[in-house]
Structure formats: structure tokens, C-alpha cells
């Protein structure tokens, strides 16, 4: 989606880890992601649950604008991100030009979407798979590893081809076995994004892009030397 189709009144830059808005806060600005990556999450019984990742062209805040209620989720920049604020006057003018019946339909859909979101993450519902003790990933040759390493958008992680997907934001340990390296490397990872089988385009494979979050100095040096030889 091209963000230039929107009337953008202003642009804001958010640093990695910076909160754009919090769940329950007031405000109904609609943002469009121009560049970067934004995480959407809800807090249930004191625990954070990631419900989606937005990239270029993604919209956030549209439920609050049309539904006239407080923020339903928390939005946080996962990396340095540029967001455009869609012109409020333009939105209101366009919305008010719609027939009363059509405006009512949009408002009803918006409220229904918020209610479904709240029910899906209601206390007592399982929103994450059972904890993963450790994933073991082995590479038979260097070329296969290189493809998985560079296939990850940050090149600080891996693309894991699988249909058994973990949710975005999920943390897990990974036993990484490199070809020609004795013993596996133990790396803590976080799911940055995933691609379902039904979302695959031509030449794409289902799987997860995972980001390395913690690695020992020894294993980091081994990984660094291995990559430098590729």
C-alpha cells in the first residue's frame, strides 16, 4: 500500500522501543507507517500480548477515530520508524460527506471490531502456544545458512522455514548448529514477523523471521567468524 494516497498533515519519527500511544489513553489521530516497524499489543492480566506487526503502509488508530473511544491497543516502534499523521480536517470532511446510513455502518463495524478484539483477548483465553523449551535448527551447508541469515530483514537473525508459526514478539531459545562447527550455539531469539502458507506469493515460503536478542560472547565470536567466511 502506498502511503502517498493519504493527506498527511505531519510526520513524526519514533526511536526503537518508543511508545506511540498506550492502550486506554485518549486520542484519535490516525497514523500511517511510512518507514519502519510498529508492534501492536494488549495487556491482559498484567501480561503483554502482541497482536500484530505493522510495516510500511499500515494504519493504526483508525478504530478510535471512527468509534470515538479510547485506544484499544498499545503501539510501539520496534525500530526507528517514521509515521505520518493523516490530516484530521480532511478525514472529518470526507466522513461527514457520507450518507448518515453509511456512516452508521462504518461506526457499527468499528465497534464490532473492538468488541471482537476484546473477546479474543479476554482473561482465561489462551492467546499464546504452550512455551517452547528450545528449537533446534541445523544447517547442512554454508549456502543454506547464508540464505536464511540474509533472508531476515535485520540480518541480525534468521528466517526459519516452517508452518508451525509462533506469534510475533514471542521469545524462545534456539539451538543453532552450524556446518563445520562443533556443538550448537545457544541463542535467545524473538519472533519479528511471520508469513503464513496462505500469505505466500510466488517464490515465497512460510516461516518466521527471528531476531537474536541474547548470545554469549563465545558463541557470538564463533558466529561472527563463521559469517565473515561466507
Image (cartoon, grey):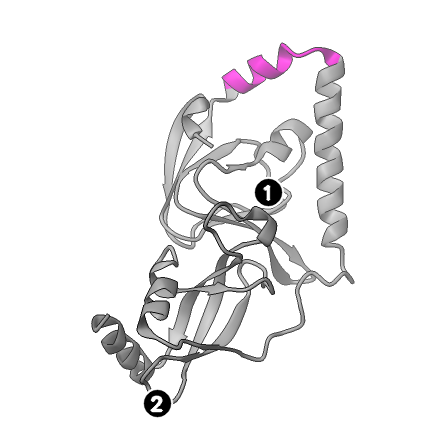
- Report the quarter where the C terminus lies: bottom left
Residue at figure coordinates x 51%, y 16% from the top left:
90
Query: Horizontal and vertical percent for residue 169?
Result: 53, 60
Is 208 on the left-hand or right-hand side of 101?
A: left
Q: Give the crowd class for mark 1: few <14, some 14-19, many >=20 residues within 10 Å.
A: few
Is 227 on the left-hand or right-hand side of 176?
A: left
Is 203 on the left-hand or right-hand side of 168?
A: left
Q: Given the current orientation, which residue lies at the most extreme bottom position? A: 182
Residue at figure coordinates x 64%, y 43% from the top left:
72
Helix, strand or loop at disc 1? loop
Q: Give the crowd class for mark 2: few <14, some 14-19, many >=20 residues within 10 Å.
A: few
Residue 156 bears which disc, if any? none
Q: For the magenta stretch, what is the residue range?
A: 89-100
Query: Horizontal and vertical percent for residue 162?
Result: 54, 64
Residue 182 bears which disc, if any? 2
Number of numbered labels in the structure image:
2
Q: Quadrant of residue 61?
A: top right
- Mark 1 sits on what residue? 25
Q: CA distance from mark 2 to mark 1?
A: 52 Å
Is there CB contact under 8 Å for labels 2 and 1? Answer: no
Query: Horizontal and vertical percent for residue 216?
Result: 35, 81
Residue at figure coordinates x 72%, y 26% from the top left:
107
The foreground one among 156 and 42 is 156
Amino acid at each position: 500500500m502506498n502511503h502517498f494516497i493519504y493527506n498527511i498533515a505531519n510526520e513524526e519519527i519514533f526511536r526503537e522501543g518508543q511508545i506511540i500511544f498506550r492502550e486506554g489513553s485518549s486520542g484519535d489521530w490516525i497514523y500511517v507507517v511510512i518507514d519502519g516497524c510498529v508492534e501492536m499489543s494488549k495487556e491482559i492480566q498484567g501480561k503483554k500480548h502482541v497482536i500484530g506487526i505493522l510495516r510500511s503502509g499500515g494504519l493504526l488508530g483508525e478504530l478510535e477515530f471512527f468509534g470515538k473511544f479510547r485506544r484499544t491497543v498499545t503501539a510501539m516502534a520496534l525500530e526507528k520508524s517514521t509515521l505520518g499523521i493523516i490530516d484530521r480536517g480532511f478525514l472529518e470532511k470526507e466522513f461527514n460527506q457520507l450518507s448518515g446510513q453509511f456512516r452508521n455502518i462504518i461506526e457499527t463495524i468499528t465497534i464490532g471490531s473492538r468488541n471482537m478484539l476484546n473477546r479474543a483477548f479476554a482473561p482465561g483465553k489462551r492467546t499464546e502456544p504452550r512455551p517452547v523449551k528450545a528449537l533446534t535448527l541445523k544447517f547442512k551447508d554454508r549456502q543454506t545458512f547464508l540464505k536464511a541469515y540474509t533472508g531476515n530483514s535485520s540480518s541480525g537473525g534468521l528466517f526459519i522455514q516452517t508452518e508451525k508459526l509462533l506469534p510475533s514478539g514471542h521469545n524462545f531459545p534456539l539451538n543453532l548448529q552450524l556446518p563445520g562447527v562443533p556443538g550448537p550455539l545457544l541463542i535467545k531469539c524473538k519472533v519479528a514477523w511471520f508469513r503464513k502458507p496462505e500469505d505466500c506469493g510466488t517464490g515465497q515460503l512460510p516461516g518466521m523471521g527471528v531476531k537474536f536478542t541474547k548470545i554469549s560472547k563465545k558463541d557470538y565470536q564463533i558466529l561472527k567468524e563463521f559469517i565473515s567466511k561466507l
